[in-house]
Image: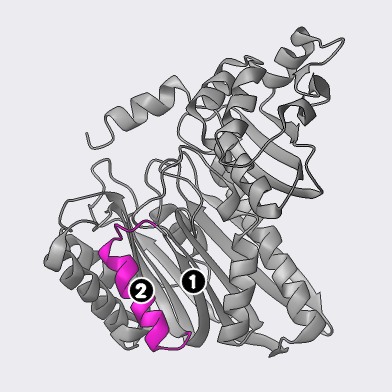
Amino acid sequence: MSCPGFRFAGVAAGIKKKGGLDVAIIAADTTAAAAAVFTANRVKAAPVLLSAAALRAARGRMRGVVVNSGNANACTGRQGAADARAMAAAAARAIGARPQQLLVASTGVIGQPLPMDRVGAGIAAAGAALDARGWDDFARAILTTDKQPKTARRELRLGRHVVTLLGCTKGAGMIAPNMATTLTFIVTDAAVAPAALARATRAAVAPSFNAIAVDGDTSTNDMLAVLASGATGPALVGTALRRFTAALTELCHDLATQLMRDGEGVHHVVTIDVRGAASERAAQAVARRIATSPLVKTAIAGGDPNWGRVLCAAGNAGVPLATDRLGLRVGDVEVVRTGALAPGYDEVRAAAVMREPAYTITIDLGAGRAAARFLACDLSHEYVSINADYRS
């Protein structure tokens, strides 16, 4: 896969203990419009702080991204900040840019210093390997505990021009909403002004990457970045910009769904559909609480229609509820009506729905017209096993 105006690379530098590609670069042929959202975790990794500051200083005009996997460069003090700057400088040399024009991202184990000799050699090798068709290597090089690469592509016809959107994401655990959730990179050849791209990015992230939860933990390193080369067509405004934003949102939803399916130990991806809320904020709070409840997630893992756990989680969301108005469905099976077990409830059918790899849990709060959706998943034995020996 390719996108006009960009080259990509991913190489093995020996950072990951289990081997594999672990240093990656996106290089724009010329200065590109850029937008990004970052983790809301108040313990932020050095590359997050550096990238956010660089993006502000450059007013949304960047030349590329450099990424390492296998080490988060988080909670590494002054040395970590210096190492992030050194990554930007090395990548800038490799692509012929200024260090301030590079976004830097890292992912992996927290609290360990980067092996900068290997990182530096990897960046140089990635620079030499840059290729317009190097996207697949880039997408693999950003992975950690992921089972497989997660990529998506969209093409959008705007008048006489067809623009491309190409994205990839990584992440399988430490996933919860609050800005980007994991590392995600999107490139497009559309011509979009930086301010417009920033608005489009925020709009695309809200119903996608900000509406998923694997385990309820927002990472120290989360970043979602979008770069637009402007290689195809005139600057997008009006209807064309709205259509671009819709395509970007669709792409983000695709990537976020893939991320959930590839979550650590995940066997079921469940849409939490909250309806009848008094406000959108209330709907989101209830959906988020259900999606992150360990008791709900273990019930999903066991295929157990223990509906009391769902109502319990809704009641813990900090939203005023009238119990006698609540309704609940698992797939097409009515479970709760007016706050109590629905007449004719069929638990065998509900359990059968919950054995499916994907289904919807719908809760109606009976308080208004607002709604929200979240993607949730199970909490399985495999998740515990993966994270119990993550550093070994």
Q: Indicate the position of residue 163 as horizontal and vertical percent values.
A: 71, 76
Q: Which residue is mark 2?
A: 51
In-front residue for pair 218/91: 218
Quick one: label 1 or label 2, which is nearer the N terminus? 1
Q: Secondary structure at mark 1?
A: strand
Vertical order, 108 against 225 (above or below)? above
Identity, as a three-letter code, of the amino acid under mark 2: Ser
Point 35% across, 88% down: residue: 97
Reply above or below: 115 against 82: above
Indicate whether residue 119 is drawn in magenta.
Answer: no
Who's the residue at 22% across and 63% down the image?
Answer: 119
In terms of secondary structure, what is the magenta stretch mainly?
Answer: helix
Q: Residue at x 74, y 80 (%)?
A: 241
Q: Which residue is mark 1?
A: 36
Q: Residues within 10 Å of mark 1 (few under 14, many from 20)?
A: many
Kind of residue sitting beneath label 1: Ala
Image coordinates for residue 371, horizontal then vertical, percent: 75, 48
Q: Residues within 10 Å of mark 2 (few under 14, many from 20)?
A: many
Q: Which mark is residue 382?
A: none
Could you say whether the residue bearing mark 2 is in a helix, strand or loop?
helix
Left or right of residue 289, residue 331 in this image: right
Residue 272 is left or right of residue 327, and the answer is left
Residue 389, image x, y percentages: 26, 30
Dots 1, 2 in contact, CB < 8 A: yes
Res 186 visible:
yes
Q: Which image quadrant: the N terminus?
A: bottom right
What residue range appears in magenta?
41-60
